[in-house]
Image: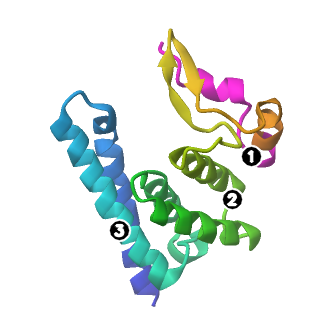
């Protein structure tokens, strides 16, 4: 069993590495590159679905810290597979409740899914783009409470976060 989990951990981290290598293609001007990104995230989303079927949420206890973070990244980027994101969110919520995963990743995945479903995000983790040099977040359900909710999830204040997206 330990060998199986080591293989699963290696697979998840390899998927995340491929994701990182290709992520710039998501916003490419070249449709073929965008399509390659979409195909990669779809294949990874499908595989994450199989992993969740077999093991539940891949927690750090199960696959190690790096592979657990990789699973979260794969779920984050499954934007065209809302069924995968919903299942991942539900399983990740359970893992957070059990103390097997952190609230930060949960907050990011919840916001991402809400935005993908056309809703308002909670913690302001999703940025729609940059307009006139200023990062523009997707709408938030309670903008006046964003920093409070971010702090509860272990996320830096909103202004510090969006400053990362401003062009240099």
Q: Quadrant of the N terminus?
A: bottom left
Circle 3 Cα neighbour tier, 10 Å, few/some/many (<14 / 14–19 / ≥20) = some
Foreground: disc 2 or disc 3: 3
User: Mark 2 near mark 1, Cβ–Cβ under 8 Å?
Assistant: yes
Q: Quadrant of residue 158?
A: top right
Residue at screen point 68% across, 66% down: 93
At which x and y percent is residue 8?
A: 40, 75
Q: Which residue is mark 1?
A: 154
Q: Which residues are magenta?
A: 151-168
Residue at screen point 64% across, 32% down: 139
In the displayed image of the protein, which residue is found farthest to the left?
A: 32
Q: Which SS class for mark 2?
A: loop
Residue closer to the observer: 20 or 31: 31
Disc 2 to disc 3, C-alpha distance: 24 Å
In the displayed image of the protein, which residue is found farthest to the bottom?
A: 1
- Residue 102 badge: 2
Q: Is residue 17 magenta?
A: no
User: Mark 3 near mark 1, Cβ–Cβ under 8 Å?
Assistant: no
Q: Which SS class for mark 1?
A: loop
Residue closer to the observer: 143 or 161: 143
**Is the image coloured rainbow, by chain, by secondary structure, or in one colour?**
rainbow
Mark 2 or 1 closer to N-term? 2
Q: Which SS class for mark 3?
A: helix
On the question of residue 14 being in view, the answer is no
Mark 2 or 3 closer to N-term? 3
Q: Which residue is mark 3?
A: 46
Q: Is residue 153 magenta?
A: yes
Circle 1 Cα neighbour tier, 10 Å, few/some/many (<14 / 14–19 / ≥20) = some
């Amino acid at each position: 069993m330990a060998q199986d989990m080591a293989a699963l951990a290696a697979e998840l981290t390899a998927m995340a590495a491929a994701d990182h290598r290709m992520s710039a293609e998501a916003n490419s001007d070249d449709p073929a590159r965008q399509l390659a990104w979409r195909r990669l995230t779809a294949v990874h989303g499908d595989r994450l679905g199989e992993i969740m079927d077999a093991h539940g949420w891949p927690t750090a206890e199960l696959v190690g810290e790096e592979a657990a973070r990789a699973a979260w990244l794969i779920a984050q980027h499954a934007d065209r597979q809302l069924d995968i994101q919903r299942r991942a969110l539900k399983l990740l919520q359970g893992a957070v409740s059990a103390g097997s995963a952190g609230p930060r990743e949960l907050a990011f995945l919840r916001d991402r899914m809400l935005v993908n479903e056309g809703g308002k995000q909670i913690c302001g983790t999703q940025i729609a783009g940059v307009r006139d040099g200023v990062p523009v977040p997707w709408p938030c359900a309670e903008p006046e409470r964003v920093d409070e909710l971010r702090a509860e999830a272990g996320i830096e204040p909103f202004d510090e976060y969006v400053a990362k997206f401003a062009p240099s």
